[in-house]
Amino acid sequence: MEVKFFSQFQFSIDHILPRSVNGSEELDNLALACQPCNGC
């Protein structure tokens, strides 16, 4: 099965607590963010 999602925005995975302040790579510290909103 193939799932396609179409949006005008590109999405990225962002850290809730940034890695620069020892934020982890665990799922509970990750969030989906649109790239324009995230400054990408």
Image (cartoon, rainbow, N blue to C red):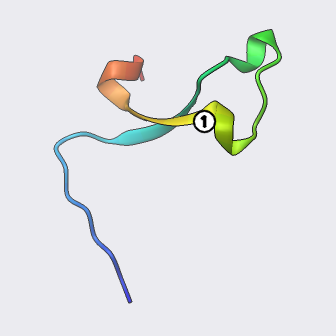
Residue 3 lies, with reference to residue 36, above or below; the image says below
x, y (%) of residue 6?
20, 58
Mark 1 closeness class: few <14, some 14–19, many ≥20 residues within 10 Å: some
Q: Is residue 6 above or below residue 14?
A: below
Which of the 4 quarters of the picture holds residue 29? top right
Identify the element where label 1 is drawn: strand
Q: Residue at the front extreme?
A: 28
Choose between 39 and 22: the one closer to the eye. 22
Looking at the rendered structure, the kind of residue marked 1 is Leu
Location of residue 7 in the rendering, given as x and y in whole percent from the top left corner: 19, 49
Q: Is residue 21 left or right of residue 5?
A: right
Residue assigned mark 1: 30
Residue under the point 32% across and 42% down: 10
Q: Residue at (40%, 16%) from the top-left corner?
A: 39
Left or right of residue 21, residue 8 in this image: left
In percent of the image, x 78 and y 30: which residue is there?
24
Residue 30 is drawn in which quadrant? top right
Outermost residue, top direction?
21
Report the front residue among 11 and 25. Answer: 25
User: The C terminus appears in which quarter of the rendering?
Assistant: top left
Quadrant of the rendered image containing residue 36:
top left
Q: Residue at x 38, y 41 (%)?
A: 11
| Residue farthest toward the bottom in the current orientation of the protein | 1
Against 39, residue 13 (above or below) is below
Residue 32 in the image: x percent, y percent?
Answer: 45, 38
Instruction: Give percent across and percent down for residue 21.
Output: 78, 10
Give the number of marks: 1
Indicate the quadrant containing the N terminus: top left, top right, bottom left or bottom right: bottom left
Most distant residue in the left direction:
8
